[in-house]
Image (tube, rainbow, N blue to C red):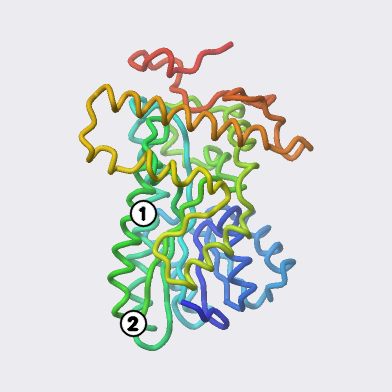
């Protein structure tokens, strides 16, 4: 897809972070921009930012929508057609949440919340929008679907399992839809960034009340730590430009080059191909220890580069925490079946 001007884009999670960066990039290309988000105040702020970025107000549609609710999401699709005269030519599903903790501590609520937003909302959007897009645009004009996945889709992490599983599934879906849409004149792209300067570190604040039962240790301190890490991530507008280039060139997968030195190792170390090598238990243990050390070094670098001007908590080296922060990725202290080394302990 190369011609964006005058066409329609819908971006889920478009009120902040990567989604807002994408809205700015494709709006600057002359597209009519619809953004969907569950946070009404964030939508209002995003609309102001888009106007300040130079996108005409008449070309902006901000919709409050629960993307995990199919009736709500269908109403969102109807609204886009009502206001802009048709379904989106470009669908980008970027909304995402995450939480960290030992996989053996995970609850049904942890899975339902993380996978509900990160995977099921993508499924919902594809099932709701793709038939409309095919009917409206097949063999007439270019159209495309895209999703923001993560470097986590390529990793094996016992403290981020629901998120990584969801993102791996999103990658598979985009590969499948790319093949399926090609005969109609469409295609699909999946974006896999390693770290984004976004608000995902605050995701727990927006976890629905009916899904609050978590096995993870979550606090204002853990969110402060995550904010400090994410503050070192790639700029959302820069990431949006990378996605645009990928779509223009028909790439199915887009790996941003924010930390290019990490990608070859990640793809080599965390690929499922490693399991296909029939490693022995000892070899798997050694590989896991090596991977853990690589993750430690990666996050050390992120923390070292975190802003020190008040825009994020000042970092400490090596898995230490910023002032006011706490180590994340631990289980609740009361879960007696979890290894004590993986449980949070009050200092």
Q: Which residue is mark 2?
A: 135
- Identify the secondary structure beneath mark 2: helix
Q: Position of residue 5 (x, y in %)?
A: 57, 81
Toward which corner of the image does residue 205 lie, by quadrant? top right
- Identify the secondary structure beneath mark 1: helix
Residue at (45%, 49%) from the top-left corner? 150
Residue 230 higher or lower than 47, as above or below: above
Q: Which mark is residue 112?
A: none
> From this viewpoint, which residue is outermost toward the right?
309
Q: CA distance from mark 1 to mark 2?
A: 24 Å
How many marks on residues? 2
Crowdedness of circle 1 by 10 Å Cα count: few (<14), some, many (20+)? many
Question: Which residue occupies the foreground of this view, 297 or 218?
Answer: 297
Q: Position of residue 99 (x, y in %)?
A: 47, 36
Q: Which quarter of the image is occupied by the C terminus?
A: top right
> From this viewpoint, which residue is outermost toward the left?
278
Toward which corner of the image does residue 320 lie, by quadrant? top right
Q: Position of residue 172 (x, y in %)?
A: 31, 56
Q: Which of disc 2 and disc 1 is earlier in sequence?
A: 2
Question: Which residue occupies the foreground of this view, 195 or 262?
Answer: 262
Q: Which residue is mark 1?
A: 170
Residue at (45%, 68%) from the top-left corner? 91
Q: Position of residue 3 (x, y in %)?
A: 52, 81
Residue at (72%, 67%) from the top-left corner? 53
In contact (CB < 8 Å): disc 1 and disc 2: no
Residue 14 higher or lower than 335, as above or below: below
Question: Which residue occupies the foreground of this view, 337 or 321?
Answer: 321
């Amino acid at each position: 897809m190369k011609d964006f001007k005058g066409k329609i884009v819908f971006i889920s999670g478009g009120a902040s972070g990567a989604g807002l960066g994408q809205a700015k990039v494709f709006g600057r290309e002359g597209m009519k921009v619809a953004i969907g988000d569950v946070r009404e105040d964030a939508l209002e702020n995003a609309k102001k930012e888009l106007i300040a970025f130079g996108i005409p107000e008449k070309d902006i549609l901000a919709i409050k929508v629960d993307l995990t609710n199919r009736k709500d999401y269908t109403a969102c699709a109807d609204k886009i057609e009502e206001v802009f005269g048709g379904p989106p030519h470009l669908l980008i599903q970027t909304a995402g949440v995450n939480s960290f903790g030992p996989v053996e501590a995970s609850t049904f609520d942890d899975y339902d919340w993380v996978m509900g937003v990160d995977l099921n909302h993508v499924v919902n959007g594809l099932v709701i929008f793709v038939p409309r897009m095919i009917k409206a645009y097949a063999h007439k004009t270019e159209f495309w679907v895209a999703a923001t996945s993560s470097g986590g889709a390529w990793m094996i992490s016992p403290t981020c399992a629901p998120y990584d599983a969801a993102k791996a599934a999103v990658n598979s879906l985009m590969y499948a839809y790319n093949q399926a849409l090609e005969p109609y004149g469409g295609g699909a792209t999946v974006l896999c960034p390693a770290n984004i300067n976004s608000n995902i570190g605050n995701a727990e604040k927006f976890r629905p009340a009916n899904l609050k039962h978590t096995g993870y240790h979550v606090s204002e301190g853990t969110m402060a730590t995550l904010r400090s890490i994410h503050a070192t991530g790639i700029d959302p507008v820069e990431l949006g430009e990378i996605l645009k280039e990928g779509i223009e060139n028909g790439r199915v997968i887009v790996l941003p080059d924010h930390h290019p030195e990490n990608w070859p190792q990640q793809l080599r170390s965390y690929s499922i191909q490693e399991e296909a090598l029939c490693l022995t238990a000892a070899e798997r243990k050694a590989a896991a220890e090596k991977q853990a050390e690589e993750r430690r070094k990666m996050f050390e670098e992120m923390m070292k580069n975190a802003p020190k001007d008040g825009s994020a908590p000042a970092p400490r080296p090596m898995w230490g925490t910023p002032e006011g922060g706490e180590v994340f990725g631990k289980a609740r202290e009361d879960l007696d079946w979890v290894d004590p080394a993986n449980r949070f302990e009050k200092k």
